[in-house]
Image (tube, rainbow, N blue to C red):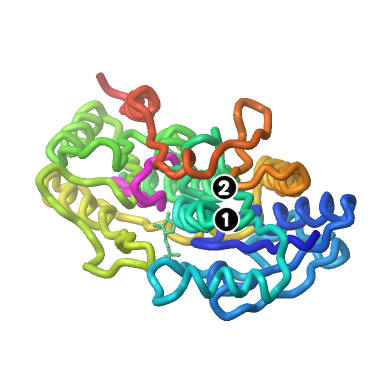
Amino acid sequence: MKIGVLTGGGDCAGLNATIRGLVARSEEYGFEVLGIERGWKGLIEPAGKKITYEMVDELVGVGGTFILTSRTNPFKMDGGPEKVVKSIKKLGLDALVAIGGNDTLGVAHKLSQMGIKVVGVPKTMDNDLSSTDFTFGFDSAVNVAVECIDRVKTTGMSHERVIVVEVMGRDAGWVAAYAGIASGAHVVLLPEKPFDIAKVCRTITKRWDAGKKFSLVVVAEGAKAKGTKVTKGAAVDAFGNPILGGIGQFIAKEVEKRTGLETREVVLGHIIRGGAPSAYDRVLATRFGVAAADMVKNGNFGMMVALKGNKVVPVKIGGALAQKLVDTNLYSIANSFSGVS
Ligand code: F6P
């Protein structure tokens, strides 16, 4: 049995640990693993290398993906899907393990409907895939975000300023909600609930009036101000996703203008996506990689590994593609610590 493995979309912490888990269990089964380079691009222009356990032995704690990634959508290319099928034959692959988020797994789902034997592994710092409680990459991103926010907090407090921190997460506010709660933010703004800038300013002013001369606002890059559209431009990626960013700057400017308080914004961006995985993500990613090899062995194709409670189970890839959003309960917890009533 020859398994191809690829990582697609934005990288996140834990990808190498997953490949290591996959290769370790595959070798136990006597399977060969071929690393497909640069996500789906590596099946448009076939590019792969044999991966042995020896090669991945020391990668459990290493960030990024050593087989590289790209945002390539074969279904947006002339003859793309046919090229992928041809490459799979040419490389002699019996099965494919696709490690990715909604976009990469969306392609995996379509290929599986075309008869390709695919197993999906969910990864994304955004944690926005349905059918799995968590994706690896998320815990690492939240931990780094909290470390950074703790740092900007002490400078903000020393200067009696308002600090606005923008974090990634696309159209789901998981990172902002978790990082906001864990860093004691006073206002947390998520894409799931359009916000009123006047209300944000009122919360901050109230804190100043109560003698609390520091405020921390954590905002998700996809958060929207009611009645105002903030984007970085019209550009979209190969999957039609807009390039987000700029909401933190918008809020900081408005807060300073409306409250007269000195305000600074910090965009954490890719800093929280890159780097070493947390211990939690190393374990989750390893479990996912091992489970993917088991699923290939058991013929669970068209399925994705998923975390349900504390169990790793197979679920249908097609059912996991819908975006998982932050629920109202978590949103209200995140916004219940302004420190003034
Ligand atoms: O999908 C993960 C993600 O990190 C999003 O949170 C973010 O909007 C996007 O990728 C950024 O992508 P790029 O690496 O292409 O700038």
Residue drawn at (10%, 45%) of the image: 227
Pick the front one: 260 or 270? 270
Residue 201 versus residue 39: which sits nearer the camera? 39
- Residue at 60 percent across and 58 percent down: it is 116
Q: Is residue 19 above or below residue 90?
A: above
Q: Residue at x 28, y 53 (%)?
A: 248
Give the residues in magenta.
161-174
* Residue underneath mark 1: 115
- SS at mark 2 in the image: strand
Residue 307 image point, x, y percent = 61, 34
Residue denoted by label 2: 122
Tell me the amino acid under the disc marked 2: Pro
Q: Secondary structure at mark 1?
A: loop
Query: As rendered, which of 159 and 191 lies closer to the eye?
Result: 191
The part of the image, by quadrant, that contains residue 15 is: bottom right
Quarter of the image where the C terminus is located:
top left
* Camera-side residue of 266 and 32: 32
Q: Residue furthest front?
A: 115
Q: Amino acid at mark 1?
A: Gly
Q: Residues within 10 Å of mark 1 (few under 14, many from 20)?
A: few
The residue that appears at 61% across and 60% down in the rendered structure is 275
Q: Is residue 71 above or below residue 12?
A: below
Q: Position of residue 320 (x, y in %)?
A: 48, 40
**In the shown orientation, is residue 144 left or right of residue 79?**
right
Image quadrant in which the N terminus is located:
bottom right
Q: How packed is label 2: few (under 14 Cα within 10 Å), some, or many (20 or more)?
A: many
Q: Kindly indicate whether the residue at mark 1 contacts the one at mark 2 (C-beta within 8 angstroms).
A: no
